Image (tube, grey):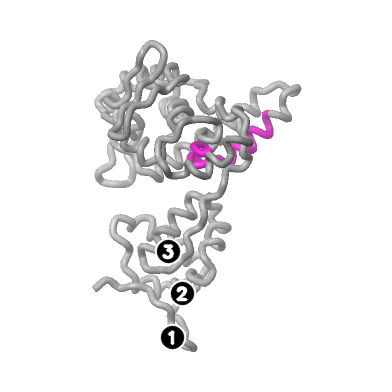
């Protein structure tokens, strides 16, 4: 029987945090995330029962976790038997943001071109991370004017992503492992897992990190290359990029008029369509 965390009896002292965590078995398939959650809790001297009382706010503040990360570790804690409330995914802030700089290539670095291609496609095909993780190259066809994406759910015409797609495909054709990869967004280096390989399928966590890095680097580039006369407007955009997650990017694209690809996040985004200008595109 799997050991599960339970509330201590009234007036019974809880065991030391390390011992309390040691009694629990990590949820299957989430061993790495569980270990990181435990390490973060132990840094603050929190056991499972204290974590259930405080929630993840102390850990998020200490580690600088973003909302998507808090949501992930909330789920992991719940899978391990700790009754944490599942936080709401926050609405994007600001509600309007110029996303076009994230779709424009400014160099030939593989990680950069992969992210630019992803953002360019997602601006017209705002699929969740799980769908991009599973998207295969054979499902994307380039015509003279647009990309055509075909999945089990239907077919989509994606405009404005041809240049980014061809730049990324041209680069990956020079590297055998990337050229042979079936994934649209393959791994560019080996990760810590034994099954990880160049050209392999990226994890959702790796994709979230990839997007966050691209957004921050784009913000730095905009601030470094913009003339003083436009600095105020660019600083506002850059500030939005510094805290932008892919979920927020996707909801902003939906609010800007992109057709929903999946139900997740679409309802909240579409509530803003009538009051949000097309500036997100």
Tag 3: Cα neighbours inside 10 Å, few (<14), some, or many (≥20)? many
Of the image marks 3 and 2, the number of the one nearer the N terminus: 3
Which residue occupies the foreground of this view, 245 or 177?
A: 245
- Measure the alpha-carbon separation of dots 3 and 2: 12 Å
Pinpoint residue 57: horizontal percent, then vertical percent.
55, 61
Element under disc 2: helix
Q: Disc 3 or disc 1, which is closer to the eye?
A: 1
Residue pointed to by mark 3: 38
Q: Specify the segment rendered in magenta.
A: 234-251
Circles 3 and 1: CB distance less than 8 Å?
no
Crowd around label 2: few <14 · some 14–19 · many ≥20 (10 Å)? many
- As helix, strand or loop, the secondary structure at mark 3 comes to helix
Q: Residue lying furthest bottom in this view?
A: 11
Q: Position of residue 124 (x, y in %)?
A: 46, 27
What residue did someone put label 2 on?
Answer: 49
Identify the residue at image location x=49%, y=69%.
51
Give the mark nearer the N terminus: 2 vs 1: 1
Quadrant location, the N terminus: bottom left
Residue at horizontal 44 percent and vertical 16 percent from the top: 163
Of residues 91 and 112, which is closer to you in this image?
Answer: 91
Is 229 in front, or is 252?
252
Relative to 168, 213 lies left or right? right
Residue 194 visible: yes
- Taking the spot 39% from the left edge, 59% from the top edge, the residue there is 76
Q: Residue furthest front?
A: 274
Image-based side of 275 in relation to 145, left or right? right
Q: Secondary structure at mark 1?
A: loop
At x 25% / y 46%, what residue is drawn? Answer: 194
Residue 211: say if magenta.
no
In this view of the protein, which residue sits in the foreground, 142 or 55?
142
Give residue 149's position: percent from left, percent from top. Answer: 34, 26
Earlier sequence position, callout 3 versus callout 1: 1
């Amino acid at each position: 029987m799997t050991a599960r965390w339970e509330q201590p009896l009234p007036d019974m002292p809880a065991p030391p945090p390390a011992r309390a965590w040691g009694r629990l078995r990590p949820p299957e398939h989430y061993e790495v995330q569980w270990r990181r959650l435990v390490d973060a809790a132990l840094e603050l001297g929190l056991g499972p029962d204290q974590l259930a009382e405080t929630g993840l706010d102390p850990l998020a503040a200490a580690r600088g976790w973003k909302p998507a990360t808090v949501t992930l570790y909330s789920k992991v804690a719940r899978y391990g038997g700790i009754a944490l409330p599942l936080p709401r995914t926050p609405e994007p802030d600001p509600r309007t943001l110029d996303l076009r700089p994230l779709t424009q290539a400014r160099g030939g670095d593989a990680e950069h071109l992969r992210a630019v291609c992803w953002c360019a496609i997602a601006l017209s095909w705002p699929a969740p991370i799980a769908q991009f993780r599973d998207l295969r190259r054979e499902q994307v066809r380039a015509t003279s004017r647009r990309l055509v994406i075909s999945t089990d759910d239907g077919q989509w015409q994606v405009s404005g992503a041809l240049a980014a797609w061809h730049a990324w495909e041209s680069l990956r054709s020079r590297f055998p492992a990337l050229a042979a990869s079936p994934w649209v967004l393959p791994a560019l280096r080996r990760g810590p897992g034994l099954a990880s390989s160049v050209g392999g399928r990226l994890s959702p966590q790796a994709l979230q990190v990839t997007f966050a890095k691209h957004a921050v680097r784009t913000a730095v580039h905009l601030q470094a290359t913009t003339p003083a006369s436009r600095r105020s407007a660019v600083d506002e955009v850059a500030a939005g990029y510094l805290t932008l997650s892919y979920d927020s990017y996707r909801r902003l694209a939906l609010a800007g008029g992109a057709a929903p690809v999946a139900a997740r996040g679409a309802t909240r985004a579409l509530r803003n369509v009538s009051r949000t200008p097309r500036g997100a595109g």
